[in-house]
Image (cartoon, rainbow, N blue to C red):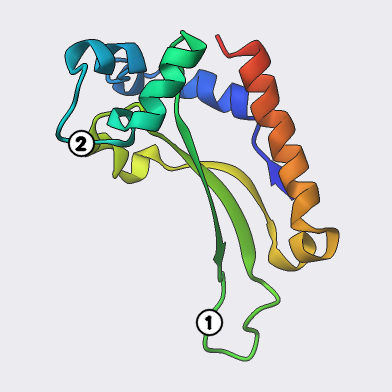
Amino acid sequence: MQLIPLCRSLENLFTSEQISSHVKLPSDALLANPNPTVFTRALDGHLMRSLYRRVKEDYIAIELYYDDIEVVNPTGTKKGPKKLGVFYYCIRNLPNHMNCHSANIHLLCIGYTMDFKECGYEKIMEILQKEFSELENNGFS
């Protein structure tokens, strides 16, 4: 398994003007539209707004995904053993036109699916939880 440190990855992303100049913080959304009737992104929803009111700080919303990918011909005789498991994330504080762009898909962890199954997904999630806890407690520069 290969892990890309989350804090370092975010630091690199946010040094880019393409990302940092477009970030929409929850406080911006709340001030711009205090009672939305049209929801254009997840940050407009009631739960995300109540989270902001509860923590009273702006935050970066990160959406985590998992997927298996085949790196060989999926219909061939070698189907399965070379399958990779990939954890990746998207930053949801960006405008809609950037949210669905492939440049907003960032690798967090990759490994053989068989290895993930053998050691258990719980162990992998513990490692990822440590990454997110470090981000929550220390932030990034």
Q: Is residue 89 above or below residue 138?
A: below
Task: Name the residue tied to disc 1.
Answer: 74
Left or right of residue 111: residue 71: left
At numbered mark 1, what does the secondary structure look like: helix, strand or loop? loop
Label 1 amino acid? Pro
Quarter containing the C terminus: top right
Q: Looking at the image, do the residues carrying marks 2 and 1 touch, with CB atoms under 8 Å apart?
A: no
- Quarter of the image for residue 86 reads bottom right
Left or right of residue 62: residue 35: left
Residue 105 in the image: x percent, y percent? Answer: 43, 42
User: In the image shown, does 49 or 101 lie closer to the viewer?
Assistant: 49
Identity of the residue furthest to the left in this view: 38
Tell me the tag on residue 104: none
Q: Residue at x 57, y 89 (%)?
A: 76
Label 2 amino acid? Thr
Whole-Å distance between the Cαs marked 2 and 1? 37 Å
Task: Name the residue tied to disc 2.
Answer: 40
- Quarter of the image for residue 40 reads top left
The tag earlier along the polypeptide, 2 or 1, is: 2
